[in-house]
Amino acid sequence: MIDIHSHIMPDIDDGARTLEEAVAMAEVAAADGIRQMVSTPHMFNGISNNPEPSEILDRVKKLQDAVGSLLKILPGNEVHISHEIAEQAKANRVTRINNRNYMLVEFPQLTVPIGADELFYKLQLQSIYPILVHPERNVQIQNRPSIVQAFVERGVLIQVTAMSLTGDFGGSARQTAEKLLRHNCVHFLATDCHRAERRPPILSRGRDAAAQIIGAERARRLVYENPLAVVNGEPVEMESPIPFTKEKKGLLSRFFG
């Protein structure tokens, strides 16, 4: 399996605090069957010191030396969405996954920013493919999952947290993740791991939970084939989303019709 979202890099954000903790996380990941892990420290949300890509590469090399053959560590970032996101990308202030053409983008926890679709489009104009991370944990999307469908129809890829599918982020996140799976609105599962024990790098449980909903072959695609395409900079095969119906329209309808 390949994990495209992790906070294994030590002493940079709210993930691993020490190199020893990072190695312990690598051991858990390897035991779970993860063979490649993208290190994606936070950018532009006040949690990290906003490291430049050159610093990320240096830190990845040091981490890889410490981890050894347990698993392969790749560079990346989890970028907080803002109106400057396109300019930040153009200025090479963010690290794309494995220095290719995909980038993780996160929303605030409570809301979907107004104009998010336009911000994604500005990235796409630079041949950067945005991957929206853990939308199932966003309160506004929990109330109206079809928001994600609208993004997918615009070419945005979606990553769900494995622990959401096992209920570790609560019932609302689990139900939303399951709905997104049923509607072809999930392209990756990832751990978003932070520690070896708390929010650990375990992907298999989420994969198995997904398999109960969409079948083993499609679940495997979310943890291997699709992530492999991303780290290699190749196109990800996207199925057409299945439209959501019977959603209550109210305040949220102003964002996506």
Image (cartoon, rainbow, N blue to C red):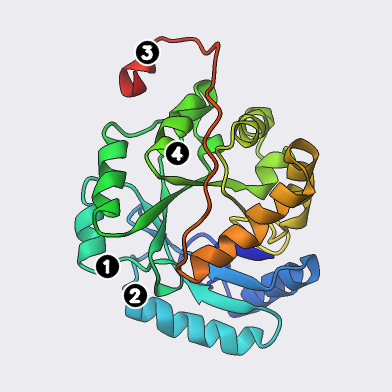
**Quadrant holding the N terminus:** bottom right
Q: How far from the left and from the top, in percent, is residue 9?
A: 53, 72
Amino acid type indicated by mark 1: Arg
Residue 51 picture quarter: bottom left
Residue that numbered label 1 is attached to: 93
| Disc 3 to disc 4, C-alpha distance | 21 Å
Q: Is residue 241 left or right of residue 24?
A: left
Disc number at residue 53? 2
Per the image, label 2 sits on a secondary structure element best described as helix
Per the image, label 4 sits on a secondary structure element best described as helix
The mark nearer the N terminus, 3 or 2, is 2
Give the vertical position of 134 relative to 2 (above or below): above
Per the image, label 1 sits on a secondary structure element best described as loop
| Disc 4 to disc 2, C-alpha distance | 28 Å
Amino acid type indicated by mark 4: Val
10 Å crowding of disc 4: few (<14), some (14-19), many (20+): many
The mark nearer the N terminus, 1 or 2, is 2
Q: Is residue 45 left or right of residue 16?
A: left
The mark nearer the N terminus, 1 or 4, is 1
Residue that numbered label 4 is attached to: 152
The mark nearer the N terminus, 1 or 3, is 1
Q: Between 103 and 56, which is closer to the camera in this rendering?
A: 103
Q: Is residue 130 left or right of residue 201?
A: left
Disc number at residue 164? none
| Disc 1 to disc 2, C-alpha distance | 7 Å
Identify the residue at image location x=52%, y=13%.
247
